[in-house]
C-alpha cells in the first residue's frame, strides 16, 4: 500500500500547511471558492515543491469559518488529516464558510427610557428603523451618532458595519425645568462642592482650586475634571485629576546669606543669579567685606552671559576692573585651583565696610520711620562701637556693634532700666512670640515701638521695630472664580470664541502666499512654536506658556495642518489692504475642506468654530496691510461669504506672520523659536483687549504686560477675566496681609488682593466692575524671558493696579464690550498707580520704572480718585524686606 500512496510530511505553522512530497511523481491543484469573500488564487503542486496554504480571505460583516470540502452543507472541514485521507493526485475544490458578525448597539439615553423594540445588536444584512425613546418632561429630538449631535441617524441600513453608540437628543417640553445634582469630588473621595443645576446648563465649580498633598518626591498640579464637564443632562460626579511633578531636591540660590553679610539686600541690585549648586565663602573682617559665590553648575557661556547683564545694569570701574554696586565692587572669576580637577566660575563682591556712629544710625532710622524725635525714644547705649545697621524686615532693624564692658549683663540691665524710666513697658505677649524679653513704647493707639537686646562677651544686637496694635492678621476672603469673558459672551449672545478654561484642540493653518514660499522646515518650527516644551523652544511655546500662566487651567493642543498655497501672488492680497487676509483665508478654508473636520473645533457647541489660526509666509510689516498680526471676525470681510464648514460657521480667527517666530528675545541666549506674538494674539481670541496705547509709546501699564508689549506674563486683570485668578477680597478695615509672589504662583490663590469700589460689587459673580488689584512681583517665572527689556522691572516690588472693567450698556457679539480702553491720557481700563506719584506713564518715551513699584515704606493712595467719584482711601505699609527671590511679602493694608 505504501507504494500506491504518496509519502507526505505536514508542518503546521499558524494557518499554513506545508506539504513536502517524495516518492512517485505527483501533481495536483487546489481550487479555492471564497463564497463572497476576497479572491484566493488557486495553487498547484508539482513534485519537489513545498505546498503552502494561502492567507485566509476576508468579507465585510463576516468572520472566516474555515475551508470545507462540500459546497452545499459546509459540513466537512478541510484539515491536514482530511487531506491525508484523500488521493492527492486528484485536483481538490475547497469552499469558504462564513459566520455573520453581530455588532453591539449602545444607547446613551441621558435619563430617558428606550423603546422596547429598538434592537440591541445588528448584522450587515439587517435594516432597523430606530424608534423614539421617552423621557418625562422632554421631547425627543432625534438619534445621533455622536455626543456633539453633529451626525443624525434614523435607521441602521443594510451594509452597516461595527459596534455603534447612539445618543438621544432631548428638548424641554416647555412645562417644567429639571434640576440635577452635580458633585465635585477630590481624588481621595472627599466632596469639594455639591450644586443643584438646571438641565441644559454647563455646570461651574465655584470652590477653591482642588489640591493633592505633596509627597517627599512629588508635587501635584490640578489638571481638571474626569469625566470632562458637559452640559447637564442628569446627576453627575466629577473627580479632580492631577499631574505629578518630580521635586527638584537641589536648592535654588538663596540671597539671604549674602544679604546678611552686607547688612542689606545687595543681591536685589544685581541681575538674577540662576544656580542650584553653589557655596558662599565669607572672608570679611571688621573693616572689610570680601565674599565669594562659587557656582558649580555655571559654564563659560553662563559667566559671559551674566557679565553682559552686569554691563546692562551697572557702571564698570576701570581702575578696580569691577562693576560698582552701591558702596561695593563685583566681578566674575574663574577658579581652577581650589577644587581639584574642576573649573569653577563665580561672583566676587568686596569693599570697605562703612561703620556708623550712634548719631548716624539714629539719623538713618529717623528717616526710615519718619520719626524726627527717634533719638529721644531710643537713647544711646554707651560703649557700643563699630555700629552697623541691618534692615531685617520692612519695619524691623538690627543694630549691631562691638561691646566689651567689665560686665556686659550688668550694663545691659542698666540700659533697660533707663528705657523703663522713659516709658517702656515689658510686653509679655511679644516676649512669648519672640522668645526674648520685649519692651514696648506707645506713641498712639495705632503706633508702638518695640525692642529686645541680645548680647555676648564682645557684641550686642538691638532689634528695634514699629507696629500698629490695631491691625489684625489677614483673614481675607478668597473670591470664587469670576465669570470669564467667554462665559459672558455665551450668556449675552449665545455664542463665543475660544474658551479660556479647559482642554482644547486649536486649528492652525499655514498659508503659503504663492510667490513667498515657507522654508523647508516650517512644519517643525510651527510645531515647536505652538506645542513645544520650554526646553525645546529655549523659552516657551504658546501651549506651555498658557499652561503655566493659567496654573494648568488652560491646556491647548494645536493641530497644525499641511500648508495651503494661495492662487495669487502677494500683490493681489496687498491690493485689498486690511481686507486682503480674508481673501486668502477663504481660499484656505475651502481648499482644505476635504482634509479637515471643522466640526471638531466647536467645543461649546454654539455653532461657531471656536477659533482658527492662520500663519502666512510673507515677512511682517506693520506699515503694509495685511502683513501684520491681528485677531478679527469673518463677519466683517470676505469670509462672511462662507456659509458653513462641516455644519459650523467660521468667525474668530488669528492672522499672523511666520516671521514672528524668528524674532529674537534679548534675555534668552539659546532661543530656538519665539512664540510671544502668537501668545499675545491668543489673548484676543479669548476676548481680552490690548493694553498698549495708540497715542503714546508707553501706555498706563508702561509695557508691563503680555497684552501690552508682549512682555512677561498676563497681568492680574487678564487672569481674573480668564477665570484663572482668585484674589483675596479686602473691604473696610486694617489687615496684615501676606501675598505670595505673583510671578511664581502655582494655583492662582493668595497672589493678589482686590479692593472693590463698593463692597457689594463682587456679589454678582463677575469682575466687570471698578476696583484695585495689588500683586507682589518678582523678576522670575514667565517674566524672566524679558527681564532685560526696559519695561519689565529687574527688581521685586508691589504693583498696584486701578481697574475699571465696567461694560457698555449695549454691546454686540465681537464688538467692544468695555467702557474704557488704554488709549489717551485718562479713563483707562487698566493703569498702574505709580508709587512715586510722578505721572511718568503714559509717556512718549518712558516705560514702567522701578520707582513705580512699592518696595519699602508706606504708599497712601488717597491722592488718586475712582472713576465713579471719591478718593482712594487705601494705604499699604510694607513690613518685609523685599528680595528678588522672595516667595512672599507682608504688608499692612488699610481700607477706609
Image: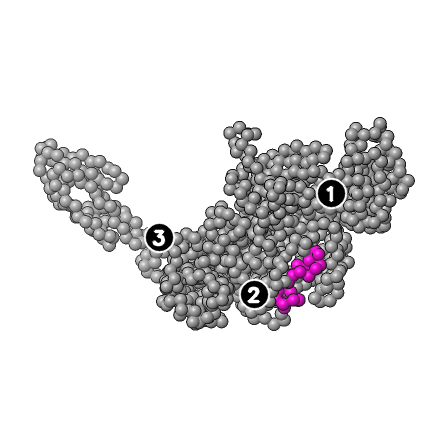
Residue at figure coordinates x 77%, y 40% from the top left: 356
Alpha carbons under labels 3 and 1: distance apart? 81 Å
Q: Which residue is mark 3?
A: 102
- Indicate the colouring scheme: one colour
Q: Nearer the viewer, mark 3 or mark 2?
A: 2
Is 565 situated left or right of 865 in this image?
A: left
Whole-percent x, y for residue 579 in the image:
46, 70
- Which residue shows up at 70% across the image and 45% down it? 881
Callout 2: 10 Å neighbours few (<14), some, many (20+)?
some
Badge 1: how crowded within 10 Å, few (<14), some, or many (20+)? many
Rendering quarter of residue 439? top right
* Residue denoted by label 1: 391
C-alpha separation, residue under disc 2 versus residue under disc 1: 51 Å
Q: Which residue is mark 2?
A: 489
Number of numbered discs = 3
Left/right placement of residue 217 relative to residue 262 reads left
Secondary structure type for disc 2: helix
Question: Going from the N terminus, do you reach mark 3 or mark 1 first?
Answer: 3
Q: What crowding class fits label 3: few (fewer than 14 Cα within 10 Å), some (14-19), or many (20 or more)?
A: some
Quadrant holding the N terminus: top left
Q: Is residue 821 magenta?
A: yes
Residue range corresponding to the magenta coloring: 819-842
Q: Quadrant of the C terminus?
A: bottom right
Q: Is residue 360 visible?
A: yes
Q: Is residue 116 left or right of residue 415?
A: left
Q: Going from the N terminus, do you reach mark 3 or mark 2 first?
A: 3
Q: Are marks 3 and 1 in contact (CB under 8 Å)?
A: no
Q: Residue at x 40, y 70 (%)?
A: 572
Alpha-carbon span between mark 3 and mark 2: 47 Å
Amino acid at each position: 500500500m505504501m507504494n500506491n500512496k504518496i509519502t507526505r510530511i505536514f508542518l503546521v505553522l499558524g494557518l499554513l500547511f506545508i506539504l513536502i512530497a517524495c516518492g512517485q511523481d505527483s501533481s495536483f491543484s487546489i481550487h479555492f471558492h471564497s463564497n463572497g469573500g476576497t479572491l484566493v488564487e488557486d495553487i498547484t503542486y508539482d513534485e519537489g515543491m513545498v505546498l503552502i496554504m494561502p492567507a485566509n480571505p476576508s468579507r465585510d460583516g463576516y468572520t472566516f469559518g474555515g475551508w470545507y470540502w462540500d459546497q452545499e452543507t459546509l459540513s466537512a472541514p478541510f484539515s491536514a488529516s482530511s487531506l491525508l485521507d484523500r488521493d492527492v493526485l486528484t485536483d481538490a475544490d475547497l469552499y469558504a464558510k462564513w459566520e455573520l458578525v453581530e455588532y453591539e448597539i449602545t444607547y446613551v439615553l441621558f435619563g430617558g427610557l428606550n423603546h422596547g423594540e429598538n434592537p440591541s445588536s445588528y448584522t450587515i444584512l439587517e435594516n432597523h428603523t430606530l424608534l423614539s425613546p421617552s423621557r418625562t418632561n422632554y421631547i425627543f429630538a432625534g438619534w445621533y451618532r455622536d455626543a456633539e449631535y453633529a451626525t443624525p441617524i434614523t435607521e441602521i441600513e443594510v451594509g452597516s458595519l461595527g459596534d455603534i453608540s447612539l445618543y438621544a437628543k432631548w428638548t424641554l417640553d416647555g412645562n417644567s425645568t429639571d434640576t440635577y445634582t452635580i458633585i465635585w469630588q477630590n481624588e481621595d473621595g472627599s466632596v469639594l462642592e455639591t450644586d443643584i443645576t438646571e438641565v441644559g446648563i454647563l455646570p461651574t465649580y465655584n470652590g477653591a482650586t482642588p489640591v493633592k498633598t505633596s509627597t517627599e518626591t512629588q508635587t501635584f498640579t490640578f489638571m481638571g475634571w474626569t469625566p470632562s464637564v458637559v452640559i447637564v443632562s442628569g446627576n453627575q460626579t466629577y473627580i479632580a485629576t492631577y499631574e505629578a511633578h518630580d521635586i527638584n531636591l537641589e536648592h535654588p540660590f538663596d540671597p539671604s546669606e549674602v544679604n546678611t553679610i552686607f547688612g542689606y539686600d545687595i543681591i536685589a541690585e544685581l541681575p538674577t543669579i540662576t544656580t542650584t549648586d553653589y557655596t558662599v565663602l565669607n572672608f570679611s573682617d571688621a573693616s572689610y567685606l570680601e565674599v565669594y559665590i562659587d557656582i558649580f553648575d555655571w559654564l563659560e557661556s553662563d559667566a559671559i552671559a551674566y557679565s553682559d547683564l552686569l554691563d546692562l545694569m551697572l557702571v564698570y570701574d576701570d581702575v578696580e576692573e569691577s562693576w560698582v554696586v552701591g558702596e561695593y565692587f563685583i566681578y566674575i572669576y574663574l577658579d581652577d585651583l581650589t577644587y581639584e580637577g574642576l573649573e569653577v566660575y563665580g561672583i566676587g563682591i568686596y569693599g570697605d565696610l562703612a561703620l556708623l556712629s550712634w548719631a548716624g544710625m539714629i539719623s538713618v532710622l529717623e528717616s526710615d520711620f519718619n520719626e524726627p524725635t527717634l533719638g529721644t525714644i531710643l537713647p544711646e547705649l554707651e560703649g557700643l562701637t563699630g555700629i552697623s545697621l541691618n534692615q531685617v524686615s520692612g519695619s524691623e532693624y538690627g543694630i549691631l556693634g562691638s561691646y566689651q564692658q567689665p560686665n556686659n549683663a550688668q550694663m545691659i540691665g542698666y540700659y533697660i532700666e533707663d528705657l523703663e524710666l522713659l516709658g517702656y513697658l515689658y510686653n509679655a505677649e511679644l516676649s512669648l512670640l519672640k522668645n526674648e524679653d520685649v519692651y514696648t513704647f506707645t506713641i498712639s493707639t495705632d503706633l508702638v515701638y518695640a525692642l529686645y537686646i541680645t548680647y555676648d562677651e564682645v557684641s550686642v544686637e538691638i532689634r528695634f521695630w514699629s507696629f500698629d496694635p490695631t491691625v489684625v492678621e489677614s483673614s481675607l476672603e478668597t473670591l470664587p472664580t469670576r465669570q470669564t469673558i467667554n462665559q459672558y459672551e455665551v450668556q449675552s449672545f449665545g455664542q463665543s470664541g475660544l474658551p479660556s478654561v479647559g482642554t482644547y484642540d486649536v486649528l492652525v493653518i499655514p498659508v503659503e502666499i504663492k510667490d513667498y514660499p515657507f522654508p523647508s522646515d516650517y512644519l517643525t518650527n510651527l510645531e515647536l512654536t505652538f506645542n513645544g516644551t520650554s526646553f525645546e523652544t529655549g523659552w516657551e511655546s504658546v501651549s506651555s506658556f498658557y499652561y503655566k500662566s493659567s496654573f494648568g487651567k488652560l491646556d491647548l493642543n494645536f493641530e497644525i495642518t499641511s500648508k495651503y498655497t494661495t492662487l495669487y501672488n502677494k500683490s493681489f492680497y496687498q491690493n485689498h489692504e486690511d481686507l486682503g487676509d480674508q481673501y486668502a483665508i477663504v481660499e484656505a478654508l475651502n481648499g482644505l475642506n476635504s482634509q479637515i473636520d471643522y466640526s471638531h473645533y466647536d467645543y461649546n457647541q454654539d455653532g461657531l468654530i471656536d477659533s482658527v489660526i492662520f500663519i502666512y509666509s510673507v515677512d511682517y510689516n506693520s506699515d503694509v496691510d495685511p502683513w501684520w498680526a491681528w485677531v478679527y471676525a469673518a463677519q466683517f470681510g470676505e469670509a462672511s461669504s462662507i456659509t458653513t464648514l462641516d455644519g459650523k460657521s467660521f468667525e474668530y480667527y488669528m492672522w499672523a506672520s511666520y516671521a514672528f517666530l524668528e524674532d529674537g528675545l534679548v534675555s534668552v541666549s539659546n532661543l530656538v523659536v519665539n512664540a510671544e506674538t502668537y501668545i499675545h494674539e491668543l489673548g484676543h481670541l479669548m476676548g481680552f483687549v490690548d493694553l498698549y496705547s495708540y497715542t503714546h509709546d508707553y501706555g498706563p501699564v508702561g509695557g508691563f504686560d503680555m497684552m501690552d508689549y508682549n512682555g512677561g506674563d498676563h497681568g492680574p486683570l487678564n487672569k481674573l477675566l480668564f477665570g484663572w485668578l482668585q484674589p483675596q477680597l479686602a473691604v473696610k478695615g486694617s489687615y496684615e496681609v501676606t501675598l505670595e509672589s505673583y510671578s511664581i504662583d502655582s494655583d492662582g490663590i493668595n497672589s493678589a488682593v482686590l479692593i472693590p469700589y463698593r463692597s457689594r460689587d463682587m456679589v454678582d459673580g463677575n469682575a466687570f466692575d471698578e476696583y484695585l488689584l495689588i500683586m507682589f512681583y518678582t523678576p522670575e517665572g514667565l517674566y524672566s524671558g524679558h527681564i532685560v527689556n526696559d519695561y519689565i522691572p529687574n527688581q521685586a516690588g508691589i504693583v498696584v493696579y486701578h481697574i475699571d472693567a465696567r461694560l457698555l450698556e449695549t454691546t454686540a457679539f465681537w464688538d467692544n464690550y468695555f467702557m474704557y480702553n488704554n488709549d489717551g491720557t485718562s479713563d483707562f481700563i487698566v493703569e498702574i498707580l505709580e508709587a512715586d506719584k510722578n505721572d511718568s506713564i503714559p509717556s512718549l518715551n518712558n516705560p514702567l520704572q522701578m520707582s513705580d513699584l512699592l518696595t519699602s515704606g508706606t504708599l497712601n493712595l488717597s491722592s488718586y480718585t475712582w472713576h465713579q467719584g471719591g478718593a482712594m482711601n487705601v494705604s499699604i505699609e510694607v513690613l518685609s524686606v523685599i528680595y528678588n527671590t522672595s516667595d512672599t511679602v507682608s504688608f499692612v493694608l488699610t481700607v477706609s
